[in-house]
Image (cartoon, rainbow, N blue to C red):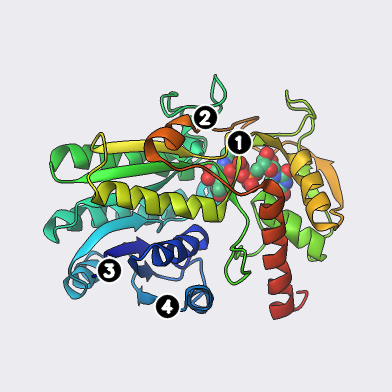
């Protein structure tokens, strides 16, 4: 019998790629999503890649009763991967309560329902945002948590605390917190990828939309940082590599390999790449020019951050594999697919 894994937010960007990797690894993922920031057509993309019809329930994880009924219907779920959350930093500053409600209520509901339905394992989507600007680079999992610079960041920190407290209180529960660096790219098939809502906030979707001609030019936020070329530095991690880490994490818990009830892993490549470097790597990988201008620094941006991945490599047994070039090509391939689907509007 295939093991069932609940994937909340499973039609979203990272969620959908994880659903594919779970299927490839012989699990039965069950998607719960309220489609607030994703599209039902993602299910077709998943089916095209895997040949498997995904199980999907349109449920809002803030709805405790609906979630309780869901667990009654799908008995025997062995693990939860919780992606269901809002993630736009700027929006979180304007609508903090939306973020606290969405991100925390969903998590609390899941954690409350886990013991009730005999589910012991949860993987949580956290972020390198919890480190703020680290004092030492590359950043390890032991680095101090810095005050959050946005309500979005606060929800990630609070969620980590809520999970740790809950696992402490219920002896059967186990959790793995995955701190993502900057996920980019799309599935190599071009069947699933990121679907930004409106004008993208994140760098690579803005780059691909500019390359496509949908945006006039990229604005590089700041060229006067204390870095070699003056632009910010990030650790860009391929989304399929990232998705695979979730499968490894689920297996680790199901095979009782966790060394502690709550484990934390950085998911990055270990390599820092500047904004300018990313743009020129994109141009080189795709042969497409990206017009850009330098703009003032963006409020709340961290100057530089990249991961120390040795703990994830050695203990989790996962390592990012894909090259930056292939990752950038996959993002461009996906953008072209969207262009042929939607036209250039
Ligand atoms: C942001 C969040 C992070 C969140 C992640 C995923 C902050 C401090 N961090 O990461 O918590 O997990 O998004 O949603 O907000 N850039 C440009 N021009 C653009 C867009 C971005 O120059 O049009 C630059 C930014 O200034 C930054 C880099 O590109 O230096 C990466 O930006 P972005 O993709 O938004 O990710 P983060 O800010 O690192």
Quote the CA–CA distance across marks 4 and 1. 42 Å
Give the mark nearer the N terminus: 2 vs 1: 1
Q: Is residue 63 above or below residue 220?
A: below
- Which quadrant holds residue 205? bottom right
**At x 42% / y 33%, what residue is drawn?**
314
Q: Of the numbered discs in the image, which one, if any, rests on residue 2? A: 3
Q: Are marks 3 and 2 in contact (CB under 8 Å)?
A: no
Question: Could you tell me if residue 294 is visible in this image?
Answer: yes
- Which quadrant holds residue 270? top right
- Split into 4 quadrants, where in the image is the C terminus? bottom right
Q: Residues within 10 Å of mark 4 (few under 14, many from 20)?
A: some
| In the displayed structure image, the side of residue 168 where residue 274 appears, left or right | right
For label 1, being within 8 Å of ligand 1 is answered: yes
Q: Are marks 4 and 2 in contact (CB under 8 Å)?
A: no
Query: Quick one: 27 or 193, which is closer to the camera?
Result: 27
Quote the CA–CA distance across marks 3 and 2. 34 Å
| In the displayed structure image, the side of residue 97 where residue 221 appears, left or right | right
Residue that badge 2 annotates: 308
- Split into 4 quadrants, where in the image is the N terminus? bottom left
Quote the CA–CA distance across marks 2 and 1. 23 Å
Give the mark nearer the N terminus: 3 vs 4: 3
Q: Residues within 10 Å of mark 1 (few under 14, many from 20)?
A: few
Residue that badge 1 annotates: 300
């Amino acid at each position: 019998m295939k093991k069932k894994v609940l994937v909340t937010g499973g039609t979203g960007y990272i969620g959908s790629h994880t659903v594919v990797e779970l299927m490839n690894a012989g699990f039965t993922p069950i998607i719960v999503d309220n489609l607030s920031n994703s599209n039902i057509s993602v299910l077709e993309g998943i089916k095209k890649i895997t040949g498997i019809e995904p199980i999907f329930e349109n449920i809002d994880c803030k709805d405790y009763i609906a979630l309780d009924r869901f667990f009654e219907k799908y008995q025997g779920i062995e693990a939860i991967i919780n992606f269901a959350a809002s993630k736009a930093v700027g929006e979180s500053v304007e609508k903090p309560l939306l973020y606290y409600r969405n991100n925390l209520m969903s998590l609390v509901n899941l954690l409350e329902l886990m013991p009730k339905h005999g589910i012991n394992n949860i993987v949580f989507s956290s972020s390198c945002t919890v480190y703020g600007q680290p004092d030492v680079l590359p950043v390890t999992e032991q680095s101090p948590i810095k005050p959050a610079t946005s309500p979005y960041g606060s929800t990630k920190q609070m969620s980590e605390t809520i999970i740790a407290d809950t696992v402490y209180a219920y002896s059967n529960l186990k959790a793995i917190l995955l701190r993502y660096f900057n996920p980019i790219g799309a599935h190599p098939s071009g069947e699933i990828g990121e679907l930004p809502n409106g004008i993208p906030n994140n760098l690579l979707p803005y780059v691909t939309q500019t390359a496509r001609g949908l945006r006039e030019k990229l604005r590089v936020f700041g060229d006067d940082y204390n870095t070699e070329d003056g632009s910010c530095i990030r650790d860009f991690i391929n989304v399929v590599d990232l998705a695979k880490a979730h499968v490894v994490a689920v297996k680790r818990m199901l095979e009782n390999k966790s060394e502690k009830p709550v484990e934390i892993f950085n998911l990055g490549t270990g390599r820092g790449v500047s904004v300018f470097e990313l743009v020129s790597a994109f141009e080189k990988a795709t042969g497409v020019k990206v017009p850009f201008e330098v703009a003032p620094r963006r409020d709340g941006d961290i100057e530089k951050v990249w991961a120390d991945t040795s703990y994830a490599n050695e203990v989790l047994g996962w390592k990012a594999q894909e090259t930056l070039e292939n990752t950038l090509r996959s993002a461009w391939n996906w953008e072209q697919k969207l262009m042929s689907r939607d036209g250039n509007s």
